[in-house]
Image (tube, coloured by chain):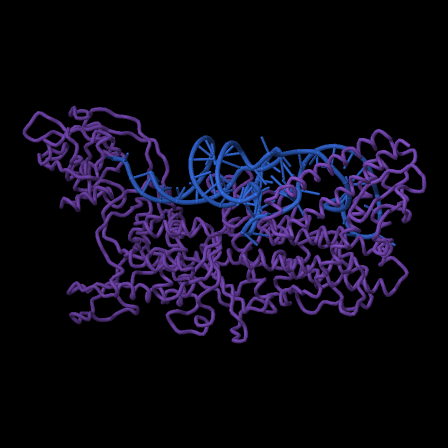
Chain colours: A purple, B blue
Amino acid sequence: MREMQTTYNHKDFEERIYADWLKNDCFRAEIDLEKVPFTVMMPPPNVTGQLHMGHAMDETMQDILVRFKRMQGYCALWLPGTDHAALATEVKVAQQLREEGLSKEEVGREEFLRRTWAWKEKYGGRIVEQLKKLGSSCDWSRLAFTMDEKCSLAVREAFFRLYKKGLIYRGNRIINWCTGCKTALSDVEVEYSEDAGHFWYFNYPVEGTEEYITIATTRPETMLGDTAVAVNPKDKRYSRYVGKTLCLPLTDRKIPLIADEYVDPEFGTGCVKITPAHDPNDFEVGLRHNLPVIRVMNDDGTMNEASGKYAGLDRFEARKQIVAKMQELGLLVKIEPHTHNVGHCSRCGTTLEPVVSRQWFVKMQPLAKPAIDAVAKNKTKFTPDRFSKIYYNWLENIRDWCISRQLWWGHRIPVWYCEDCGEEICAVETPTVCPKCGSVRLKQDEDVLDTWFSSALWPFSTLGWPNNTPDFNYFYPTDVLVTGYDIIPFWVMRMMFSGIEQTDKVPFRDVLIHGLVRDEQGRKMSKSLGNGIDPLEIIEKYGADSLRLSLVTGIAPGNDTRFTDTKVEASRNFINKVWNAARFVVMNAQGAEVPAITDIRLQPADRWIISRLQSCIREVTLSLQKYDLGIAADKLIDFTWNDFCDWYIELSKPALYGEDKERKRATLGVLLFVLDNALKLLHPFIPFVTEEIYSYLPNAKGKVITSDYPRYNMKLSYKKEAKVFEGVIDLIKAVRAMKVEVNCPPAKKVHLYLVTEARRLIAANKNSILRLAGASAIEFTENGNGNGEKTVSKVCEIGQIFIPLGELVNLDEERARLNKELERIKGEIARADGKLLNKNFVAKAPKKLVEDERAKKEKYLDMKEKVEKQLKGLFE
RNA sequence: GGGGGCGUAGCUCAGUUGGUUAGAGCGUUUGCUUGACAUGCAAAAGGUCACAGAUUCGAGUUCUGUCGUCCCCACCA
């Protein structure tokens, strides 16, 4: 027989237990038509990334739900996977190349991809190992990767279908261009920040006059691409200039002065330079007025030939020189400091350049509508519900999605161009001949797809779609998606419209949204701040169970949470408590033959703890079903620590150490029954330690992970009896408090006199009361004090307690104590009267409530009388 | 400009459909090596639930407004 150590030490078993679960295939979801499936898709972390606190919380929440459902008998599939993270990974590999003094272009596409795959092989396993350390019970046999065969096929198929329906198009539009990564980005990949900049006021000469139009700009270098200046049509100051021609300085171009509603006459000078190639609003204006689009910048952020003599200069150098030149020409009116929101690349931080570029887009309007309806019709539900509003807000204002990226790492766009006739061919499988002219000279589009295009298909691409696989048929649609609110626009939304469009079903029925894990001061954890806490270090120090529990206690769905060491310590302490409670039970059960709960003659205390267990089972189950993980965890901790450890284990000691063999056996039976259930309830939260403890239990069969989740049993709820037994607890608490209040040394046993009608109940629990209250004897009496001795007294639920304490009692202190007690009771009576004397309350409130209030008042009146009598008695 | 969160004990936060005396952890005070656990036990102090109205017999909880604070989106060149 193994022995349990005095303190819980995660290092003794976490690794061993995980290996054992794997060995026994505990996480594998075998299709079972007798069972109801429960499917969760893991949000795929970046394949070369590392586990951070956000992941840790996300994974923990999913694992709790999956383990819970698995134990409840569902066929639970938690499908893990990783994301190729096109841009993020490419940036890293390019950086590695730079360290070798090489560039992407130098090594070429093929070699670059070879290196990236090698990089993926090298680091792709790391995140998976880290997920395992957390205890994640995912089905590793189904581990997916967004660029594996399955997912790639799904990507081509989805693209093909959208293309055929005309929902994917290629066009020249303003996109966000990162000059650092040299690729287009979608709107959601832009991060805005308030940057200090300037407003430059320039004069543009009006042709054929001595007059000037003054414009203000924050990006002087773009003036070389101006193709008009606009004013508001209602702006009287400029109406006489509308239609006139301006001379664009530094060039020999003539540009028109046009009128457009877009211009705000109150802002700046009321005249706006229009640069359709380099500003989204200007682009729209340009379309309305049929203006030429002149790009003046290259993809790397240098000026191009269209900028004349500034060609080749970096955009910021060109800015300097242009401002200087304008000043020289006397066309610079003034410079004002100006802070404005500037877009930056979410990956490399480079200031983005809005430019006109030919890219692939997904038409969003037709896709957004059904996605909105699905949530409006409750086909998919957000928890908490408020996130549906945010979801609507996004989809209702959505613009077309730029999906092409000028990168190499990713899904190549499945479009080929015939080099002979120029035909554009979209196909799932690589075409060999041009269907139009029969040429074999076909060239695939150079670009790859936005990473999120493949992530959007994740709930079904991982199950084998578009093939009609058994997995897809059984596990799809999935049940719940667990993710942070920051991912709604990137991912949740896109999975929704992609799922509905491609499979005609919502991809998940529930979306459980959680908040961000912040640092101790409430700041976002970030690399640049260096305030991130490494979950692996926490696991090393406190264990995965402690980390998991600390991440889900005290959290509310959708709210941010702070991570602190003290929280982990609190969790660790709780786990140690569970450990020791189990140790206590196991030690006492050593070698004993323990009866089943059904074969035991239960005592009041037994029924009380079993009753508490039943309500714990019910509340925890309900909370988990509602995704209230924080509440479930709190309830469990409260039950285990307070009800089970502090009360029942203590109450059980007289029986365990007593002479009555039968009673001892029975008590052990109850202890084991409750412990067994508690471990099962706790398992989803703290899987390792519960599994470890389970192996020590004399009556345990198999493992917790594969055991049945406890079910609420009404026959064991013993509501009335439990309520009655609370009187015993109340009595013990009252005696303890009295002893402290009158400065009685804890070790000194007191003689209790009780006036009570619950003599049988108290007699039945005599030994427990003596032990827990620190008393030497209990004596029932009829009169209001202990046989004429000087006593202190207290009124409690089941009667009045008198303790003779002789010289220990300070009369003044005792009088003060009783007066305070009297005040409290009077307050309660006044409160009850406030309600009961209100006719409306008596007439309109539920009867039960009124009756309760009356009973309460009676009780307090009785208490008041007793306390007053005792006060009087003090001076006799 | 649009959308949303938060404001409850010294600190960090819970508070399920309105209904006992508003809870927890940490911290604080006092006392305890009580045959599982000092990563512990017992007792206690500490809150006019931001403010003002409204609905209601009854509001931390619902509605309106105000103040403070944070986030997301859009964006005036």
Is any part of residue A233 visible from this angle?
yes
Q: Percent from the top left, x then y, of residue A370?
A: 34, 60
Is any part of residue A537 visible from this angle?
no
Q: Which one is in front, A85 or B31?
A: B31
- Horizontally, residue A699 falls left or right of residue A633, namely right
State the residue at coordinates (79%, 45%).
Answer: A796
Q: Which one is in front, A431 or A811?
A: A811
Q: Percent from the top left, x then y, of residue A171?
A: 22, 54
Q: Is residue A845 above or below residue A818?
A: below
Q: Which one is in front, B49 or A445?
A: B49
Q: Is residue A829 above or below residue A324?
A: below
Which residue extends farthest left? A208
State the residue at coordinates (83%, 44%).
Answer: A800
Q: Which one is in front, A742 or A494?
A: A742
Q: Which quadrant is the C terminus of chain A positioned in?
A: top right
Q: Which quadrant is the N terminus of chain A positioned in?
A: bottom right
Q: Is residue A277 above or below residue A244?
A: below
Q: Is residue A484 above or below residue A817?
A: below
- Horizontally, residue A542 falls left or right of residue A197, namely right
Q: Percent from the top left, x then y, of residue A127?
A: 50, 55
Within the image, what quadrant is residue A823 found in? top right
Within the image, what quadrant is residue A208 found in? top left
